[in-house]
Image (cartoon, rainbow, N blue to C red):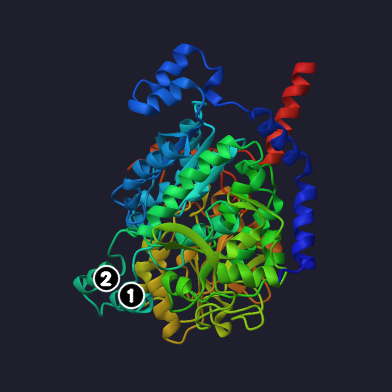
Amino acid sequence: MTPTSVHPVVREVTERIAERSSATRREYLERIRAAKRTEPARANMACSNLAHGFAAISGTDRESVKGLVRPGVAIVSAYNDMLSAHKPYAEFPDWIKEAARHEGGVAQFAGGVPAMCDGITQGRDGMELSMFSRDVIAMATGVALSHEMFDSALLLGICDKIVPGLLIGGLTFGHLPITLVPAGPMPSGLPNGEKSRIRQLFAEGKATREELLEAESASYHSPGTCTFYGTANSNQLVVEMMGLHLPGSTFVPPGTPLRRALTEEAARNAVRAAKSEEAPSIGEIIDERAIVNGVVALLATGGSTNHTMHLPAVASAAGIQLTWDDFSDLSSVVPLLGSVYPNGSADINHFTAAGGVQTLVSELLEAGLVHPDVRTVAGDGLERYRQQPFLEDGELIWREGPARSLDTSVLRGVSEPFDTEGGLRVLEGNLGRSVMKVSAVKQQHRSVTAQARIFDDQEQFKAAFQADELNRDVVVVVRNQGPQANGMPELHGLSPGLGVLQDRGYQVALVTDGRMSGASGKIPSAIQVTPEASAGGRLARLRDGDVLRVDGEQGTLEALVPDDELAAREPAAPTALHQFGTGRELFATFRQAVGRADQGASVFPTPEQQTQAQQQSRDEISA
């Protein structure tokens, strides 16, 4: 039974989000409701415009578009055949078009969006474009939907920056019913713990490149999403919890009859939503309650810290103002229920076998930790997401999923959690604010006080590690890695060396204005420090030998240096600030316009900034 009341802290956080967002959310809803239509969107087009819209179509779909009766469904896809997670999307458009046709609609491939792989670009120059790619994807989604030919949309994407970008773009067309369509994870391969072990051996010179490549290719080995619980799988779980996937569709593997059946049902559902005046649009589904439900699910499973930037940016696109304090306060009451690598040894397939999303939803609903009274693409109420899809005699049906975990080593109930609090801490002190993912860090390693060693990029750290200069208790500081400096690349190249130092018995921590994201592991890492060094942050004033305290238990990040001394120091000039080359010049404007990490690290204005700009414009007109 679902309780009638929501946990008081969850309720209080939701209410304060709604209060601080009241003006910007109201403006957003007024805008999307004004854009809603009861007839097909293309009905008011001039003949020339409409003719361009069906010139490339043949057969019955051409007549459907021309006839201005059947609703139009946009397909926006992040397909490419280089990314394992996105390769399965090659077949989806044909399935969707056929299913939409039979349901009385017409689907068109409206546009593709870029999809880069952080796994491929990790440690390479291209990684400096990764974070900005989210906002490029949002713009590309907007371009695809801007033709006004469509009455609903299906967004196909999975990984890292791709899903948040699709969501931001989709929310700018928030009057449309929009469903996200997943593709599912690859089969389990080499256990993640073994892969990590071989990476550390390679970092120490005890494994060959051939051995490392063999381990990596045994981990990432087929079409489908990588199976560790990084940003990609965090994306998928959060989106389902926010009601934008069909129930239970998130972790169904590609290449299976059930995956195809769910994709076809998503198309049919999109046509039904386009025909119904009662179906909620994406802008109505994504309200304060849905955002909080997404944050709670992330915390309860120890998901990716990237979402401390992505979810504020997504919320902002819907006129909602989400802060790191909201994450922190929710984390204090949301227990950790999942143990999936890097928080444990299991992978996402093991999580699904243990009960997966259905069990998680049941546990959180019954504990009052999520809002049950939300709108979703499957109808009203989060209760629907307790259900699991099956094929029965070739027909897609839903049955109640397991209410309790089938494997408590991977997924637990609220009464017996892995930890009484969520997997995230917000750290504050005289160095600024940062976040730490503590769910993968053993308690004895969560607080470190030691002398700092300062670096300006990963390569400097690796050189010092290989020269045996770091065999001591140390707080490694890697600065000038924020969004305004070089695009905020992920810094997973640090992990093997830091892990070796910790295994040698040293107390080790990392402080950076860059990212470590969903694959961050056993090292206490104060990441996404804001203000960043290149924007006046105090990281730029640190020196080798300064004593730093990084405390994930108490939530502190500080230099044990007198404030007047720290303030009087000249900021160090960055030694590795890349400006141009290998595509970076295309993103120079992004670096100048991007916002702070704790506001989403976006080039798009926040709701407050939009309101201020509109008021300034009105004032100028009045004057």
Picture quadrant of residue 494: bottom left
Q: Does the image show residue 306?
A: yes
Picture quadrant of residue 224: bottom left
User: Which residue in the protein does label 1 denote?
Assistant: 195
Residue 218's disc is 2
| Left or right position of 529 against 582 | right
Residue drawn at 64 percent across, 43 percent down: 280
Tell me the mark number nearer the camera, choosing from 1 and 2: 2
| Left or right position of 232 against 316 | left
Residue drawn at 55 percent across, 40 percent down: 272
Q: Are marks 1 and 2 in contact (CB under 8 Å)?
A: yes
Q: Residues within 10 Å of mark 2 (few under 14, many from 20)?
A: some
| Residue 301 position within the rendered picture, expressed as x and y whole percent measured from the top left | 56, 70
| The N terminus - image quarter | bottom right
Residue drawn at 64 percent across, 44 percent down: 316
| In this view, 367 is above or below 259 | below
| In this view, 153 is above or below 58 | below
- Given residues 493 and 173, the one toward you in this image is 173
For the residue marked with disc 2, what is the amino acid? Answer: Ala
